[in-house]
Structure formats: structure tokens, C-alpha cells
Image: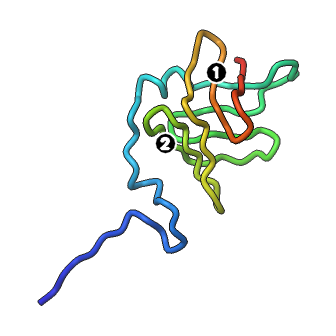
Amino acid sequence: MSSLLGCKEMPNGKLRPETIKDSSSGLRNKLIGKWGGLGESKPVFEIRKDSICYFQQSTKYPYKIVNHDFVIFFPDHEGILRNIRVDHDTIFFYDDYGLKRGYR
């Protein structure tokens, strides 16, 4: 007798990015581009089709959009930008510190 088992969680309890289904391709298309903060002289990060790139670190990380939450898969944890939305050239989201904005 043999059986196969699958798991969506990594040993440390984190979800595997490849097992999470993206829920909004329309939102993804609106997010693609370079974003910075108010008063920034250049963009802080760029959202691409399959990753987010932080210019200061010159590093990119995979992400998924799950029910309007933008989940970033850092090597040691997940970052979540909650209830993310785009209104023209402004991005709005909530993080652990409250409402945030970014600009193209």
C-alpha cells in the first residue's frame, strides 16, 4: 500500500508561494510599474508581472495577490500590504502602521 501526501506549508509554517493562487490579474496590471513615496526623488520599488524589485537593495522577491492583499515572499517572512488598490497614479494600502500611499 502506498500513499502520496502534499503540503502547502513549508516546515516553518509559511505558505509556499507556488501553492497560492493569484486572485486578481486586473489589479496586477494596474500595479505594474515603478512606485515611490511623496517627496522621493526616484522610485523605491518596481512591481513586475511576477516580482517586486526594491531598488535600494537591488533585490527582487516573488509576490501574489490574494483577495486584494499583496503578499511579498521575503526569504525569512511574508510581508502583506492589505487592501491594495490603485487610483490613477496613486497606490493605496494598509500595513502594520496604517494607511500608506505610493506614487508613480
Left or right: where 59 falls relative to 3: right
- Image quarter of the C terminus: top right
Q: Which mark, residue 64? A: 2
Q: Residue 47's x, y, as percent?
A: 61, 32
* Secondary structure of residue under mark 1: strand
Q: Relative to residue 93, is residue 103 depicted above or below?
A: above
User: Residue at image x 56%, y 28%?
Assistant: 84
The Cα–Cα distance between marks 1 and 2, rounded to whole angstroms, is 16 Å
* Secondary structure of residue under mark 2: strand
Q: Residue 12's x, y, as percent?
A: 54, 71
Q: Residue 61's x, y, as percent?
A: 62, 48
User: Residue at image x 79%, y 24%?
Assistant: 37
Q: Nearer the viewer, residue 54 or 8?
A: 8
Q: Which residue is mark 1?
A: 91
N-terminal label among 1 and 2: 2
Left or right: where 26 falls relative to 102: left
**Are the two marked residues, 1 and 2, in contact with CB atoms closer than 8 angstroms?**
no
Coloration of the structure image: rainbow
Q: Residue 101's x, y, as percent?
A: 71, 23
